[in-house]
Image (cartoon, rainbow, N blue to C red):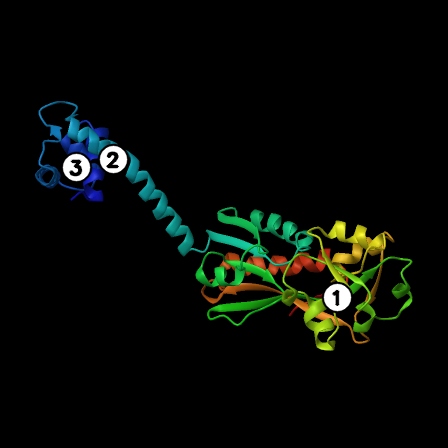
Amino acid sequence: MIELRHLRTLIALRDCSSMAEAAERVSLTQSALSHQLKDLETRTGTILVIRKTRPLRFTTAGQRLLNLASDILPMVRSAELDLERLAGGEAGRLHLAIECHSCYQWLMPTIDEFRNHWPDVELDLASGFNFAPLPALQRGDLDLVVTSDPEELAGVAYIPLFRYESLLAVANQHPLAARNHIEPEDLSTEILISYPVERSRLDIFTRFLDPAGVEPLAIRTSELTVMMMQLVASGRGVSALPNWALDEYLEKGYVSARPLSRDGVTGTLFAAVREDQLDTPFMQDFLLTAKDISAETLSGIERAR
């Protein structure tokens, strides 16, 4: 019944001192504006404007539609501007989730740098440990997921960020600290401290213990890396973490670390992105920024190419 052109006409009638001036504002002839106003009054079944006044006066019904116009038209214009910026690649949404407890070390500087480049992109960050982030990415609820466990999903691309090596952290006085490397059987008598996630998402199980058919003596979990390192340092267990996550604790001498097996266990951290968003300018910039900052910030990694 009511169209945007009608609302724009009412705003013009409110702001201008005459029908002629209002007609010029909306790029109509005075006759066409009068016809449009009459058409709106016919549609609504009521008089909206008292014409023989200067300035024009609105009836109660006209004032109600004028209030509607005041609410709706700014929202429409805002949406139009957003669409223009989106079409130009200047704005958008980047909702992220991470499947890596230690990723904040390099991800937060990445986000800070990205905000400076793209202030009009809406950013949000969530932990991916209490829900399934990759299916949420595929549905469109998320825009990027940081993961080391890619799943084959239609429409989802995995961009490698960097490669890392998993190491076993042990107390400095632990007998395993004297070894050149760790074998799976060495953990059969050890308490393994890990993050509280499914073992299918932990390299220590999927790529080291499970292939050898070895179970640790017990499993203990902790949300925080610093708490895990305190437990390890006090001889309460051992823990497998990426080399870059262990670097600060090794540098300070809190714990020791050894490779998992003679050849080592390496992994890759990926950014999972929907294919339809992969080529947007701000997404490309985020991925490049993430690679640059992780390479500058983290020790012992190999930048993905």
- Cα distance between the residues tagged 1 and 2: 61 Å
Residue marked by disc 3: 23
Q: Position of residue 75 (x, y in %)?
A: 33, 41
Viewer-proximal residue among 61 and 5? 61
Q: Which residue is mark 2?
A: 68
Neighbours of disc 3 within 10 Å: few (<14), some (14-19), many (20+): many
Which residue lies under the disc numbered 1? 166
**What is the three-letter code of the residue carrying label 3?**
Ala
Q: Is tag 3's residue or tag 2's residue first in the polypeptide sequence?
A: 3
Residue 146 shown left or right of residue 274 in the figure: right
- The residue at the point 75 percent across, 66 percent down is 166
**Identity of the residue drawn at 63% across and 62% down:** 198
Instruction: Judge by depth and name the residue closer to the eye, 214 or 275.
Output: 214
Can see residue 152? Answer: yes
Within 10 angstroms of label 2, few (less than 14), some, or many (20 or more) residues? few
Q: CA distance from mark 1 to mark 3?
A: 72 Å
> Could you tell which of marks 1 and 3 lies nearer the N-terminus?
3
Q: Secondary structure at mark 2?
A: helix
Q: CA distance from mark 3 to mark 2?
A: 20 Å
Residue 39 - label: none
Q: Please tell me whether mark 1 sits on a helix, a strand or a loop.
A: strand
**Mark 1 touching mark 2, by CB under 8 A?**
no
Look at label 2 and name its amino acid. Answer: Leu
